[in-house]
Structures are given as structure tokens and as C-alpha cells.
Image: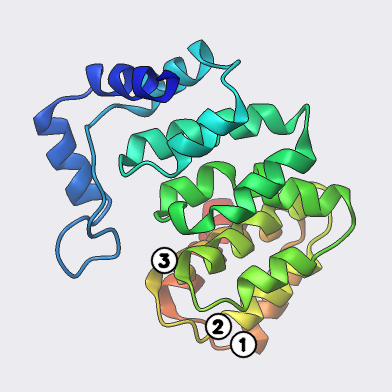
Amino acid sequence: MLTKHVIEEIKSFGSPSSAKQCERFFQGGPGQYGYGDEFCGTSVPDLRKVAKKYSNIPFGEIEKLLQNSLHEARFVALILLIEKFKIVPEEVIRIYLANTRFINNWDLVDVAAYRICGAYCQKNNGTGIIWRLAKSDNLWENRIAMVSSFAFIKNGKLQLTIDLCEHFLNHPHHLMHKACGWMLREVGKRDTKLLLDFIKSHKLPGIMKSYALEIIRKSI
């Protein structure tokens, strides 16, 4: 019943016109990467308000939200898991990894991957989980792996990102090229030479290179 109340509150902030905009923005049409997803059009600030209101919700209810067909419900679930991770990381990482099939659009990946999966792996000095996701045939698990490396970058550990970008150089999807470019840009903020050496020694897809070089262009 609690899950039902949360979803009703999420929907109360949305509108049909906003839902249509979300469907277009997150590529929810036939043949697109987000096809089949449901939207109600609630904004991220309002979703965060709902998550804050229900911050004491049990894990079982969070998992139900994470498995719900409504995109915004899954987003709220991930915000709740980020907060719970600060207290019970082992349970949160278990739920997160057991439900990656529901973390199935770029905003859902990006909001929590490095704050949960990346943070867990970085704290425990292990990259096995990340590499397992990187070698998956699933686009979203690949993106989770890539974005998780941000937690390592934030702690001055840059090589994992470089290795993952090399692994994903020939990935067929532009969303992975963008994720790699984003993480390379973050590497460049900390070590410009490492970024430039990687770019010079590899043939990067255009969008990956463009994203990676944003930090260089802004400094000129």
C-alpha cells in the first residue's frame, strides 16, 4: 500500500503534456532505446521532494518502486537507495545489482551508478563488479560500469576509466560514446596529459572525442 501512495504522489506532480515531453526526451517511441517506458511528467526537483518525504520507506517497498513500470517511480527508488547506501551499503548494493534490468535509461543510470555501484567498489578496492557489468551484452549495464568509474576519478584513481574507455571504443551505441567522453573529460580535469595521451593513441568515435575535449576547449 505504501508503494501505491508514493506512486500516486509522484503522479500528482505530473501532467499529460509533460509526460509526452519526457517520452520524447528519453526516446520512448517505437524503435528507440527507451521504448515501452511509462512517464507521468514529474520534474526531478519534485521527485526529490517525494523521496525526501518517504525517506523511511522499507527496502521491500523501494524494490517494488524500482521494478515499477513508471519511469519516475524508478528514479525515486534510486534516490532512496542513494540515501540508504550511507547507512547500509551491503543491502543497497545487493538490491541495485539484482535490479539492473530496471535501471534502463541514461538518467536512471547516471543518478546513482557512481554513488552506489562505483562508491561500493571504490571503498572496497575492487573492480570485479564493474568489469562484469562492462562485459555484459546489456547497454545499461555497460553504462553503469562506465559511470561507476566516476567514484574512482573523484578519489584520484584514473586508470580504471582509461581501461574502460579502451574496452568500449568500438561499442555500437552513441550513449556509451557519450558516457565514455564524459568520464574522459573528468579525467582531463585532473590529468590533462593522461587524457591527451589516450586521445592521441586511440581512434575515438567522434562524439566520444568531442565530449572528452570539452575541458580542453574551455581552457583555451
CA distance separating discs 3 and 2: 12 Å
Q: Position of residue 32 (x, y in %)?
A: 23, 66
- Residue 159 bears which disc, if any? none
Residue 210 seen in the figure:
no
Please tell me which residue lies in front, 181 or 80: 80
Q: Which residue is mark 2?
A: 169
Q: Position of residue 1 (x, y in %)?
A: 40, 20
Q: Earlier in the sequence, mark 3 or mark 2?
A: 2
The residue located at (77%, 38%) in the rendering is: 89
Is residue 18 left or right of 211 when viewed as pictured? Answer: left
Q: Which residue is mark 1?
A: 202
Instruction: Give the position of the C terminus as an image quadrant.
Output: bottom right
Q: Quick one: label 2, few (<14), some, or many (20+) residues within 10 Å?
A: some
Q: Are marks 1 and 2 in contact (CB under 8 Å)?
A: yes
Label 2 near label 3: C-beta < 8 Å? no
Amino acid marked by disc 3: Leu
Residue 21 spot, x, y in % from top left: 16, 40
Q: Which residue is mark 3?
A: 175
Query: What distance separates the C-alpha of mark 1 from that of mark 3?
Result: 19 Å
Q: Residue furthest left?
A: 17
Q: Measured along the vertical axis of the image, is residue 111 above or below residue 192?
A: above
Callout 2, which amino acid?
Leu
